[in-house]
Image: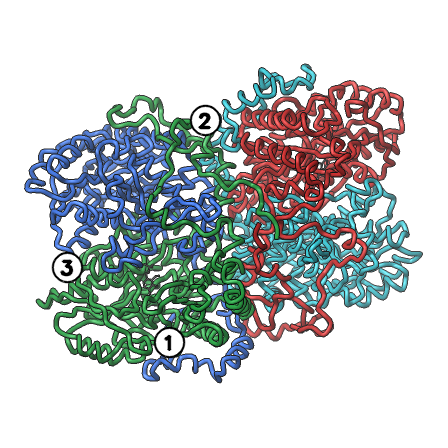
Chain colours: A cyan, B blue, C green, D red
Amino acid sequence: MDDASRYIPASEADRQAMLREIGLERIEDLFASIPESLRLAHPLEVPGPLSEQELQGEFAARARENRELDGRAQFLGGGAYRHFAPAVVDHLITRTEFYSSYTPYQPEISQGTLQAIFEYQTLICQLTELDISNASMYDGASALAEGLLMAERANPKGRVVLSDRLHPEYVQTARTYLSNVEVGVDAFGHRPDGTADPEAARKEIGGGASALVIQHPNFFGCLEEVETLARVAHDAGALLIVVVSEPVSLGILKGPGRQGADVVLGEGHSFGVPLSYGGPFLGFMAARAAFLRNMPGRLVGETHDVDGRRGYVLTLSTREQHIRREKATSNICTNEGLCALTAAIFLSVLGRDGLRELAVHNHARAEYARRALASVRGCSIPFGAPIFNEFVVTLPIPAAQAVRALGERGIVPGLPLSRYFPGRERDLLVCVTEVNPRSEIDRLAVELGRLA
Amino acid sequence: MDDASRYIPASEADRQAMLREIGLERIEDLFASIPESLRLAHPLEVPGPLSEQELQGEFAARARENRELDGRAQFLGGGAYRHFAPAVVDHLITRTEFYSSYTPYQPEISQGTLQAIFEYQTLICQLTELDISNASMYDGASALAEGLLMAERANPKGRVVLSDRLHPEYVQTARTYLSNVEVGVDAFGHRPDGTADPEAARKEIGGGASALVIQHPNFFGCLEEVETLARVAHDAGALLIVVVSEPVSLGILKGPGRQGADVVLGEGHSFGVPLSYGGPFLGFMAARAAFLRNMPGRLVGETHDVDGRRGYVLTLSTREQHIRREKATSNICTNEGLCALTAAIFLSVLGRDGLRELAVHNHARAEYARRALASVRGCSIPFGAPIFNEFVVTLPIPAAQAVRALGERGIVPGLPLSRYFPGRERDLLVCVTEVNPRSEIDRLAVELGRLA
Amino acid sequence: MEPRNLRDPEKLLFELSRPGRRGFAPPPADIPDPGRFDLDRRYTRDDIEGFPQLSEPEVVRHYTRLSRLNYAIDLGLYPLGSCTMKYNPKVHETLARLPGFAGAHPQLPEEFAQGSLRLMHDLERALVAICGMDRFTLQPAAGAQGEQTGIMMARAYHRERGDPRQVVLIPDSAHGTNPASAVLSGYRVEQIASDARGCVDLEALRRRMSEDVAVLMLTNPNTLGVFESEIEAIARVVHAKGGLLYMDGANLNAFVGVARPGDMGVDVHHLNLHKTFSTPHGGGGPGAGPVGVKKHLEPYLPVPTVEKEGERYRLRHDRPQSIGRVRSFFGNFGMHLRAFAYILALGPAGLRRMAETAVLNANYLRRKLEPIYHLPYDAPSLHEVVFSDRHLESAGVHTLDIAKRLMDYGFHPMTIYFPLIVKGAMMIEPTESESREELDAFIAAMRRIDEEARRDPDMVRTAPHTTPVRRLDEVGAARHPVLRWTAPAGGRRA
Amino acid sequence: MEPRNLRDPEKLLFELSRPGRRGFAPPPADIPDPGRFDLDRRYTRDDIEGFPQLSEPEVVRHYTRLSRLNYAIDLGLYPLGSCTMKYNPKVHETLARLPGFAGAHPQLPEEFAQGSLRLMHDLERALVAICGMDRFTLQPAAGAQGEQTGIMMARAYHRERGDPRQVVLIPDSAHGTNPASAVLSGYRVEQIASDARGCVDLEALRRRMSEDVAVLMLTNPNTLGVFESEIEAIARVVHAKGGLLYMDGANLNAFVGVARPGDMGVDVHHLNLHKTFSTPHGGGGPGAGPVGVKKHLEPYLPVPTVEKEGERYRLRHDRPQSIGRVRSFFGNFGMHLRAFAYILALGPAGLRRMAETAVLNANYLRRKLEPIYHLPYDAPSLHEVVFSDRHLESAGVHTLDIAKRLMDYGFHPMTIYFPLIVKGAMMIEPTESESREELDAFIAAMRRIDEEARRDPDMVRTAPHTTPVRRLDEVGAARHPVLRWTAPAGGRRA
Ligand SMILES: Cc1ncc(COP(=O)(O)O)c(C=O)c1O
Ligand SMILES: Cc1ncc(COP(=O)(O)O)c(C=O)c1O
């Protein structure tokens, strides 16, 4: 018996009968249009087949090789955040009508997805305090790249200016995208307290730039002076793009839209999408209404049917590749629909009060940790600016070495900044969320104390 | 904010508004009909409330206290069997339309459950080779008790005769039920090879009995001579009831109905229902058509609607308590519907070939193990009869002691029969299924060898 | 108006089956030469006649399509009176599937099952606190088995006192399982009439109560949703004659945190974890029917009980006076787990809030429907309210028609024709899980149906009109029972 | 005929919201006096204007009801051409949720993430074997990003040879993402016409091919489901002028195990794990678009790559010639995991059987529908077939109408109006997941629709008639875009 057939209805008998129906002799005849010379003589060199029992055993064993399973205390952030998601989220996204359907090209039988995405767009607008949101992008980094291209379309200057406190992988991605379309990418520096330096920004924009970009909270965890930087950007005819890689912060922080941002984009996985080693994640992008026709990605709009019933459709698709082809605002087709749904469900369960409480908890724990580590012998806090749930601590020894040492003791204390910033050997980026109980934080302080 | 309210839509404001609508002042007024003297002055002394995050933490910790988690090699059977269930089973029973609906009293909006149960009834009839099956009973033990009461209704003799190789907890349950209705319960013995003794059965029935009961495979794992015992029963005017506690065996064993059994009943959890420390499980009961009106429990029947469309309904409910009250064939109301659905899905995925292959695998592994243990120094196999996936081995030391010793080495070698049979200190009931790889079996043999 | 979707109705598994198809690959065969073990042919079968052969995707589609023919609590109000159809927290399904719990074998040595044992122990403690009883057994698989277990304990109690009794008294408003359970426990059942309020007629009880009566089975609040406010007096009457008071606790949702059976003179009662404590009904089960007892009945609890000794938990099998077992192992542990999670999530204030809101919702519905539907008993309602169809007699529209028409409005009907003391009963229990908006939508539908019944009774009598199937021939189904699929004569054989 | 169910259509979250409701309890507050940490008010907001306030049961009902408005692969045939809507094995959802995988943080030290790294490595090896390429990057999040990544690698390749080029050639039958990706990568796009068979016109290509052409983007089998049988010659023409051949592998399902892009002269190609390798489409994503390259393009792969060193796996970031990154971290790992599970489950024979059966099903459909529907190109089909509505012109019934009417028969329509080279295209891809019975039901529906179109064209033109909503005003939606909910003026404020 052929294992494969458990996923394939047709039995050998069925296949032979169907072959006869279409007047063919052998299965091989189906491929007559493929030149003999190109047809494989040997079976593929891949493992398998495995029964489901073997498959589950194999994957359980592989999962155990991810040693974070041993229940280590973890303080990792840096673009991906550990959050608790209520069980309803996963129970609802595993409704097959949600996860096994395609892009809702046929609205009459896709209202579930369409209405949910319309609600997602609204939630993103409410969080960012902007007018429009698209239906999702691949992730925060590619969302930034697309956002810069949009800024360049709307405000062509051939140049963008980024804070040096952006997530380094976002910057790398932006450079990759922009290098092909001759848009210059320049950076400006930060102040001693760890925040972007408005003066440096003004100087760097100089002759002009299509956009000024900051991250808030920034990559080192510091909160930025969004209003000030908005003024700097706008005074110089540049748009302000605010990147948010930890959107839980929007539970207490002002919506950047209200603070002057023209575009707010970033990473939304914190809203219930599992870490899953970094993907699938959820890129989001919101902007002022003026950007409507420059927006990349899908948009869901409200309308009504022939009987006057309210309904939802994919709209403004003349922006998109399947209509506009080379003139499209982006090449994105498949996006992160299910992750957007996940975020929408997560946000509706938490709701207005819950999201705020969650944000407050994250902030309070991080502040508690920052103070605790500040008083650890040999440790110091290099940046004084206010934070959300991440901060940098300078250790008495190289951070990478500290990570190895504490790993043995069941703690992953954070991300060594040397991973991205060769100059910062002793700096560790520490993230604290609602899943780090106080006891873990206290243990972290004790263990770091042992390093000096 | 009140935690409770996450499961309860009404906010405090909603509650006050509704109170006003019905003309009441205080929530307390809703309970005016409960005498003051009976109303609680103090809050309930129960733990909680817990946020969901705390709740999940609490249960994860409790689950870890079940040390079988440490990936021990287990050889436990004795009425509950470890089997692999394909993932589709759980994915389908977690469709809320299946698990959160009530008994299908309103067929027009319950066809999903009704058709699935009709299919379940058919599958049970096919496996047992009998005419009718009910929609489920609580478990194998209570199914036996109900089966004996049915036999007594159909063939009143005031007495039943049971093999001494029945599951002891089934016997205990039967005695509890029958003690109240003055039906005598007597037992008959077995032959040296471990099977029920037809001669002893004939003698014991003597003047007569409403039913003769055997378990097949029996509690010690041995296959019974069903045809012979059917003749014995029928010659003496008794019905033959065959108990099946490991229904996977029906993948290769003849349907007892074809062998002369009038009623086949038992435990169906092996068909994809998790062990879950012994419940919920799945009692099943099948019988010859003659028992239709004596059958306990629900029955689903085929019919058609006013437009001639085929449909399914609960039927013959005049047998049941909600119509017949004290004249009902049973008091059962809520049954094990979702477990019956689970079994039906499990059986449809495995299908005709899969169930047979699974049964063959179980039998081959158990035979392999039986031979392996037979050759272990100090061990012996007391019973020679053919088996399915369970057998008894006699150890050089008390079995309970062996279980403690091997537990330390990560093996649960089986069930000490002394748990039920004080005389059998050194006997261990060993069960081997598809989840016990050969390597585990070989390790078991090695470790048992160390005992002598 | 539009035509029904034209896809054929879902076939039966057996009709979908085709030879040679399969949805399962055999487990790894790592036993050398398994063939040598083949069983003697006199034991074995060649085939399972008619058994389905389907691929995995076909099985998935079959059951997914079937599921969509069902109504469910997650789709809307499910006001089945006496069934307490409340929200089933999703997290419970996650917790019940933790490998440590779902994979725990009931024959595990106790030291490897401490997590399960501790949970059962803690749930028992919580139920003791909630109900004010002294101990509980968690073994019964459902409410009916709980009743039977409770009555059998009462029987053992009297027998041991050399005072065997013959009769169990049951109000005419009781659920059918009560008399059935009493008979199954070897008793003769006598009904006692309800009074004008629908409650036990204390005088009638006093007259009937005597030394041959073992137990009075009382449902409180009763099936009209009315609290038996004379329950203390009732208990005194029963006890005075050496009888015991059994309380059917199916309606406990009405007063959790407000009052306790143990304070009402109740000697023994069951409750339904699948009602008050939110475990899913599963389209008919599983449930769980723990039974609480006062000290004097403790010796008769089924074996085993869970006992705490120091920091360890063990199963106690040696209980010489026990009635024995009512099933194998320890009960529906998966349901115990969910109920305990529910109690922990709600806590003391939350449990009370649950009962308060359930009663509030029921009284809100009553107040809004009273002006339209006939209310046979006007005693104050707790968690549910019972109306009747008397006001529509003239229109020739009956309770069944109203129930069916509700489906066209997207609601599951209420419990109908129960309790039996109300002709054409409509028993409505909204539970605390419903928002005011959902209640208002239901009220509006009931109002419109009442209008339709007068304006266009035929349309209502032929409802439902929008369901996958319409009214089914139940009489024909019972007269010519077809209880299984059989291969069509001369039909394709797999 | 029966009326539509009368329950109101599902409201928006924001319309369901009510002040003070909540579905979430805050996490344990174990930090002493958190108040002292309060942020300066200049950073903080008091409220999230209009954000929903709902209890857990209300949220569950909302999304459960919404889900039932969708069609899904588990409900029936989903013949979207070019989308390869095949069965998504349920076990993949279980495996992806193993805590060790779902909980793995992308910043974990490599020694703690060996399981994830090994899986990515093994998937790359498997794809190398299946496609006959030398290496793969798993980073692209979808097919379009894969195209862009591949084209950018080609660009880097030419640039490094001091031979920057301006043009990418794309057949007129190509998917819209091809030109869009080429432009995004800084190229000018030129279309090349298809020949009578719908394949690349080799002569036209020969004429056009020159040193300014960087890449030919070829879809194989093309969007007509036809294998580009001259692909070897095409590759020679392109290579002769120093160009590179990019293959859009969206249609790989047609020949897995039968032929390999790497043997066809392809230099670089993407494939869609969410098509050929069964990962769920999620109502629009996520997907994954790995890109395979031959040796000469390997230096340009995005960073990081996964490398095996002895028994350990590590991430290699130091790749000086790399194009850089196209996103953060390592790609959609959750999709990599599912695709790898699919490959392991099927194995070599199973993967080939998958392609064989997909092609068999497509040809079966073609054979049955050919006599009725107009077939614009009669070249042999592989995994899909494209019909047109020309035969119904007289009836005035168009492809859109046929698509909508299919919904009334319970089927999702095929891809319509693509490829653009076929006027009124109907592009049908059944995949291997469909049983013959499901195909026959679809064929019967198509046949009936053809009859209806001639008998009662208006009914077809106004279809669908049985869906939750009927035809929607898409023009109005675009003309007056309403892309978010806003609180009704003077409406209730939360
Ligand atoms: C009042 C009452 N008693 C007893 C029962 C029986 O409970 P179960 O169905 O759990 O056996 C029910 C269930 O409907 C009930 O409503
Ligand atoms: C031929 C072809 N190329 C490219 C794509 C784009 O792939 P994705 O949607 O994964 O970005 C598609 C998807 O529909 C396609 O059909």
The residue carrying mark 1 is C377
Disc 1 chain ID: C
> How many marks overall?
3
Q: Is mark 2 within 8 Å of ligand 2?
A: no
CB contact under 8 Å: marks 3 and 1 = no
CB contact under 8 Å: marks 3 and 2 = no
**Residue D141 x, y percent position in the rendering:** 68, 42
Find the distance from the CA under tag 3 to the CA under tag 2. Answer: 56 Å
Classify mark 1: helix, strand or loop.
loop
- Given residues B225 and A127, the one toward you in this image is B225
The residue most toward the right is A207
Classify mark 2: helix, strand or loop.
loop
Amino acid type at circle 1 is: Tyr
Q: Quadrant of ligand 2?
A: top right
Task: Estimate how packed mark 3 is, as few (under 14), some (14 to 19) or many (20 or more) residues with alpha carbons within 10 Å.
Answer: few
- Given residues A194 and A363, the one toward you in this image is A363
**Residue B166 x, y percent position in the rendering:** 20, 42
Q: Which mark is residue C20?
A: 2
Q: Earlier in the sequence, mark 2 or mark 1?
A: 2
Amino acid type at circle 3 is: Pro
Quadrant position of the C terminus of chain D in the picture:
bottom right
Disc 3 chain ID: C
